Amino acid sequence: MKKVELINVSKSYDKQVDVISNINVTIEPGEFFVLVGPSGCGKSTMLRMIAGLEEITGGTLKIGEQIANNLSPDKRDLSMVFQNYALYPHLTVQQNITFGLDVKRMKKDEQKRKAAEVASMLGLTDYLARKPRELSGGQRQRVALARAIVSETPICLMDEPLSNLDAKLRAHMRSEIRRIQRTLGITMIYVTHDQVEAMTMGDRIMILHEGKIQQIGKPIDIYNHPANPFVATFIGSPPMNLAKAVLDETTEELVVENELRIPVPGMERSKLPSHGMTVGIRPESILPLTPEQTGGVKLEVTTTNVEVLGNETIFSFHVGTEEWMAKWSGQWHIGIGEQLPVWLEFDSLSIFDGEEGHLIKKTVDQSHHVVQQEVVE
Ligand SMILES: Nc1ncnc2c1ncn2[C@@H]1O[C@H](COP(=O)(O)OP(=O)(O)OP(=O)(O)O)[C@@H](O)[C@H]1O
Ligand SMILES: [Mg+2]
């Protein structure tokens, strides 16, 4: 197990604009670290710099205790699964999988045993004799994964390794990769633009936007306390609802989009700035109003769209110029254009500074604990 440390790392392809700027992060030994962000934000560039396939134009990269900026790729003790697989077209699946083991002088029958083991794990047993051109995209992707897994290097870099798989296989492979990583104690740096993958696989995740770090943390902490509106809308599906808000000093209410008025509890007032803010609320925190409901802010919304997904119902409505979404568990009979009474509370709001964008008020913890009870037979 080795750590990977980036100190003020930046990258420019044209010596003018940085596509990656000032990255500071330490990936701990044995950690599953996920790098996530929209297309073009610099994920592959960062991974390729760690692999030694792309020059680092600023800062320092350390692998283990060694400065690695100028270390050749084969001396970095790592394996990589590329976004575009990079298989050898003239070699069979088996030869592609064991390619790196030849260099390590592993005995042929040992190589064969390992290839068979990993092929069975990834559902490739029937394809070992084929050439890459005789495989589907998803099968090729799994060959690339297999090659990285058999190499058993202390560090593994994966660039969107599951993007070509169907939903069921992807879910299966997510847990397989996690299991293999834990068993072998590999330090994993895993790139994806799929926030579900990031949430479910990562010990920690880093969110990158336009080459800059937005936030690093445990998935659940990022979900609960996103550092800025970008993270708030990137992690979570449907995304967090956002809207502009100001504080009405006389009524001590938060006025959202000139429409929705939310009373601010006494202790919270001093934390809020007198200039504009952005408020955010997760779709699951906008709740159905029941006759018993007392506290919170009630409002009547008009639905603009409804999706019933079997186990949950999602509907949209307008708050001023913004379209918000609510997510209710279960199946609800709701029509488009219908008026619905809903409620929400101040505690479930995230509030961001309107100018700087940083989080100024967090949501209050609403997680649950299982209460153990004796089962009477
Ligand atoms: N060889 C290159 N020369 C010049 N610019 C490049 C080169 N490679 C990448 N870029 C630019 O650098 C930025 C980051 O690219 P990168 O491939 O790292 O993005 P990414 O986050 O991996 O995106 P995706 O999710 O689409 O794979 C992009 O704006 C891209 O156009
Ligand atoms: Mg990429």
Image: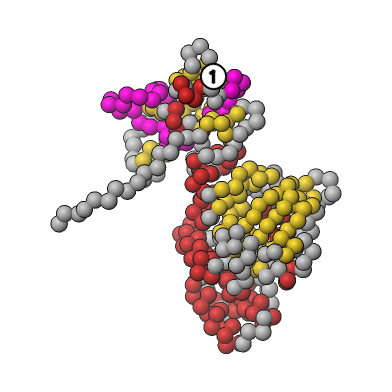
Seen as rendered, the residue at the extreme right is: 15
Query: Is residue 62 in sight in this rendering?
Result: yes
Q: Which residue type does callout 1 highlight? A: Leu
Residue 75, position in %: x, y?
A: 73, 71
| 263 to the left or right of 69 | left
Q: Residue furthest top?
A: 250
* Relative horizontal placement of residue 325, taking residue 55 as reference (left or right): left
Tell me which residue sits at (61%, 27%) in the image. 354
Q: Is residue 365 above or below residue 173?
A: above
Q: Position of residue 296 (x, y in %)?
A: 38, 25
Would you say the beta carbon of the disc 1 residue lies within 8 angstroms of ligand 1? no
- Looking at this view, is 144 or 11 the one in front? 11
Tell me where residue 16 sits by quadrant. Answer: top right
Q: Quadrant of the N terminus?
A: bottom right
Q: Secondary structure at mark 1?
A: strand
Count of numbered circles on the image: 1
Camera-side residue of 355 and 329:
355
Relative to residue 153, is residue 242 depicted above or below?
above
Residue at 53% x, 60% y: name it. Answer: 165
Q: Nearer the viewer, residue 343 or 1?
A: 1
Pinpoint residue 320: horizontal percent, then vertical percent.
52, 22
Q: Which residue is drawn at the image coordinates 41% and 28% (left, top)?
A: 344
Q: Which residue is mark 1?
A: 247
146 in magenta:
no
- Expressed as whole percent of the image width and height from the top left, the position of residue 8 reads 74, 50
Q: Which residues are magenta?
A: 273-302
Residue at 52 percent across and 80 percent down: it is 116
The colour scheme applied to this rendered structure is secondary structure
Quadrant assignment for the C terminus: bottom left
Determine if residue 243 is in view.
no
- Please determine whether, in this image, residue 376 is positioned above or below residue 275: below
Bin the neighbour count of mark 1 within 10 Å (Cα to Cα): few under 14, some 14-19, many 20 and up: many
